[in-house]
Amino acid sequence: MTFTNSFSIETFDALVIGAGGAGMRSALQLTEHGHKIAMISKVFPTRSHTVAAQGGVNAALGNVTPDKWEWHMYDTIKGSDFLGDQDAIEFMCREASEIVRELEHFGVPFSRLDNGKVYQRAFGGQSQNYGEEQAHRTCAAADRTGHAILHSLYQQNLRLGTTFYDEFYAVDLLKNQDGEINGVLVMNIHDGEYKILQSPHILLATGGAGQVFRNNTNASINTGDGLGMVLRAGYPLQDMEFWQFHPTGVSGKGMLISEAVRGEGGKLRNALGEAFMEKYAPRVKDLASRDVVARAIAIEVNEGRGCGPDKDYVLLDISHIPNEIITERLPGIREISQTFLGIDPVKDPIHVYPTCHYMMGGIPTNISGQVVSPDKDGNQQPVKGLYAIGECACVSVHGANRLGGNSLLDIVVFGRKTALTIDEALKKTPAQHNQTLNLTPVVNRLNRWLNKAECGSNDTVVQIKKDLQLVMERGCGVFRDQPTMQKALEELEVIQERLENVCISDFSNVFNLERLSAYELENLVTIGYATVVSALARTESRGAHSRVDYTERNDDEWLKHTLYFQNNHTLTFKPVNLSPKHHEMIKPKPRVY
Ligand SMILES: Cc1cc2nc3c(=O)[nH]c(=O)nc-3n(C[C@H](O)[C@H](O)[C@H](O)COP(=O)(O)OP(=O)(O)OC[C@H]3O[C@@H](n4cnc5c(N)ncnc54)[C@H](O)[C@@H]3O)c2cc1C
């Protein structure tokens, strides 16, 4: 068997790849406007990772404490360690209240205050009046907010009749003869058949890539496929050195204990029983931003004040929080602790350690959701027909460190906005489907796997993935320096070589999850390179990128984004957007909590 250039083709006005919160919000808008679209997901849509989001979504509704979108914007810029693009952050924070009200009307069952308004909890890095008292800005549906949002958006899409390709895997973007993006090759996971979905507008909403690290809060589907597709198509990834390590993952296992726990009053303690955050963030303590808390935990453990026989975790204590609050607002957290640690947090503290949680970098876009890439003069230009939203995208509203509650906001705000961009384009020029597609690169890729199906190597895709995750955890974790990252880069070369030589036992077998894992692993390895190359280049500490050998932020040299290209691991840079309107008010300064 060999793959040839003949695949069946279906045509659409627009394609949305990914059925998480971002893809769902976009698809809803496009279907509502009467466009013929398809939504593709490698898992059943409501299993998309948005379903796992616990704590909530930010909007300055002011239901619990006074609030303004300008304060939200200030906190987000400060939280981003000033790397976030201020035009995008302003747009997101201005839109937030309206977008949360819209979610409510779509049927999201938000928790309520006694007066009937949407309940809002405190999250890290939130303040009133530009850095003063703690704000309560995170709108929550108990500790299952993502579940509530995803299911409501799915129901709305079903109501309007969006076409779903459930359990179809997008393999690669396809270009027409002019080199413009015009389609995608997909594989039906059930029968292993490939087909082409063709459209002049392709929206990537493929989510994060936390699987590149060993301990992570992400589902196994979070393999950064959209990022791999973009790199192979010749476009860059932005700010890939910035990965959020969530302070409170279940120790040794990785799954998340939401920041909502500290928002409801939970306290971190070391082996001496000390509430140690008082030392690292004297004013806001446990509600400092995530990079600050993650580093504090790592320092406590590194300096010997960790708990347990190996002194390798700290304690999250909620025993002082009334039982009824835990039952009403943190039921999922209690369940996770009981299931995975065998403890009831009402009585016993939860064992926690930082775990990889979120990718601040991703596919560079402008505010309209168009993917951007530098032209030969270095000017950022939209890539015709290609869009990205949600965690796979870098717009960049999170900069060097994301604030809790801002991702669910990002996915719905830019999901909607990008759908409106595509809607405008389709109104101007209706989709035409007379383009010839260049299938050679993707056919070569498929045939490469097919041809080495009988190679006789003992290596496996599963083992290479495990080794990659370990390389990344050791080489590019909470703290980094030049020697450890250089070593990781050398180890990636070995991983890459193993990937080129590994074979799949029966590639032509129809229902073949090993084939799927191989495609995903190719994406994860490219993301590993993007991360380490970008992190090695950035000789400063900023947000989640914390270097032991360059401990200070260096705005003179590094107030800029990195752009990584796969070809020869090239790196270029682009300036941060410091919006003139807010420049004076929110200019870079030391970040203290
Ligand atoms: C445990 C956890 C808790 C969180 N809690 C919060 C919170 O309280 N508040 C907050 O703001 N943020 C939170 N986050 C972050 C937030 O949930 C995510 O960033 C966000 O939901 C991502 O949404 P998305 O639509 O971009 O991607 P996802 O929801 O991950 O969806 C990705 C979609 O892409 C599809 N896909 C991927 N690759 C392919 C492919 N090759 N072919 C076809 N389909 C593909 C998948 O099937 C899926 O449908 C949390 C994250 C985690 C891990």
Image: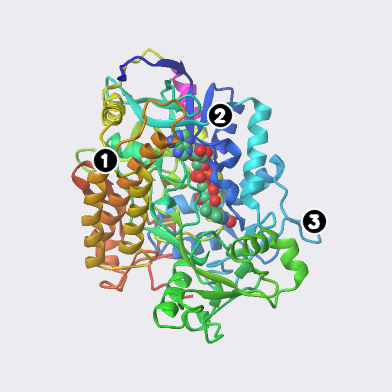
State the residue position of label 1.
457
What kind of residue is marked 1?
Answer: Ser
Mark 1 or mark 2, whichever is nearer to me: 1
Q: CA distance from mark 3 to mark 1?
A: 63 Å
Please provide the residue range marked out in magenta: 422-431
In this rendered view, identify the residue nearer to me: 219 or 575.
Answer: 219
- Earlier residue among tags 1 and 2: 2
The local secondary structure at tag 2 comes to: helix
Name the residue at 45% across, 48% down. Answer: 208
Q: Are marks 1 and 2 in contact (CB under 8 Å)?
A: no
Q: CA distance from mark 3 to mark 2?
A: 32 Å
Name the residue at 63% across, 66% down. Answer: 342
What kind of residue is marked 2?
Answer: Leu
- Earlier residue among tags 3 and 1: 3
What kind of residue is marked 3?
Answer: Gly
The local secondary structure at tag 1 comes to: loop
- In the picture shown, does residue 235 fall above or below 305? above
Q: Are marks 3 and 2 in contact (CB under 8 Å)?
A: no
Mark 3 or mark 1, whichever is nearer to me: 1
How busy is the neighbourhood of tag 2: few (under 14 within 10 Å), some, or many (20 plus)?
Answer: many
Quarter occupied by residue 62 = bottom right
In this rendered view, identify the residue nearer to me: 17 or 124.
Answer: 17
Quadrant of the rendering where the N terminus is positioned? top left
* Label disc, if present, on residue 30 of the rendered structure: 2
